[in-house]
């Protein structure tokens, strides 16, 4: 157990639908990062939050959004889902002091 | 422009056959270079952080080294349980961590 908790582990949904992925960071970590991993593209950075505020954006689609709540958990919202959105979505956290990230076990999203 | 390039894409070794994985990077203000291990369907597991050229770190059969342009992950006398995808990532300044595509290592008994 890495200390980063992601739910749900698996999600199957239809095209056009909206889903929410949830992440609880490791205790004491203020930064949360979201990554997408598909078979042909490796780990792609989506977005970072630090203590409730958006800190950095990567290759995140306009259909996707995220937020970090006062208790530091984060949610990634994916809407108008397409087949190509099927992937593993990872959340990671860090203390923000230049150390490595701790990853959760991911949410496998399948869009049918 | 790719910031992190890993080679080879895949590597098959016999148990006990030592080898090295390469990670080359093009960022200018390197804050840190990170190595992770990822098993299928699981999240990346942190292995090492290297901060400056000449730095080396070891953990069991793994040793990571860093130069100004690349890092190597040396695997000495690997075992089948070392089979995994090894990911390299770089952090430039205060920016987020960017990952390479990984090297898929298979160690045959």
Image (spheres, rainbow, N blue to C red):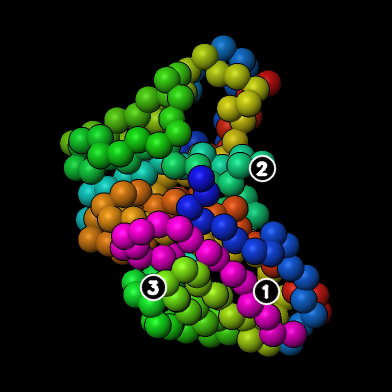
Mark on residue B81?
Answer: 1
Q: Residues within 10 Å of mark 1 (few under 14, many from 20)?
A: few
Q: CA distance from mark 1 to mark 2?
A: 22 Å
Percent position (x, y) of residue B3? 48, 53
Label 3 or label 1, whichever comes before in sequence order:
3
Does residue A74 sit above or below A3 in this rendering?
Answer: above
Q: Would you say A30 lies left or right of B61 here?
A: left
Is A18 situated above or below A29?
A: above
At label 3, counting other C-alpha atoms closer than 10 Å, the crowd grade (few under 14, some 14-19, many 20 or more) is many
Q: Position of residue B1 (x, y in %)?
A: 51, 45
- Mark nearest the camera among 3 and 1 is 3
Q: Is residue A26 above or below residue A17?
A: below
Q: Does dot 1 land on a helix, a strand or a loop?
A: helix
Question: Which region is colored magenta?
Answer: B17-34
Q: Are marks 2 and 3 on the same chain?
A: no
Relative side of A41 to A24, left or right = right
Instruction: Kindly identify which residue carries mark 3.
Output: B50
Q: CA distance from mark 3 to mark 1?
A: 24 Å
């Amino acid at each position: 157990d890495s200390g980063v908790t992601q739910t749900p582990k698996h999600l199957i949904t239809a095209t056009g639908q909206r889903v929410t992925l949830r992440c609880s960071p490791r205790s004491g970590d203020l930064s949360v990062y979201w990554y997408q991993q598909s078979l042909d593209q490796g780990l792609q950075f989506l977005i970072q939050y630090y203590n409730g505020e958006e800190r950095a954006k990567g290759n995140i689609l306009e259909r996707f959004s995220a937020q970090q709540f006062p208790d530091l958990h984060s949610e990634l919202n994916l809407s108008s889902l397409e087949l190509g959105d099927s992937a593993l979505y990872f959340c990671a956290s860090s203390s923000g002091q230049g150390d490595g990230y701790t990853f959760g076990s991911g949410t496998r999203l399948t869009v049918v | 422009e790719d910031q992190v390039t890993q080679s080879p894409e895949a590597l098959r070794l016999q148990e006990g056959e030592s080898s090295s994985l390469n990670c080359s990077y093009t960022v200018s203000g390197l804050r840190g270079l990170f190595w992770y291990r990822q098993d299928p369907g699981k999240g990346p597991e942190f292995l090492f952080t290297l901060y400056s050229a000449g730095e080396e770190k070891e953990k069991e059969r793994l040793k990571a080294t860093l130069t100004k342009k690349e890092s190597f992950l040396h695997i000495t006398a690997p075992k089948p349980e070392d089979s995994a995808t090894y990911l390299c990532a770089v952090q430039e300044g205060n920016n987020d961590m960017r990952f390479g595509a990984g090297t898929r290592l298979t160690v045959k008994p």
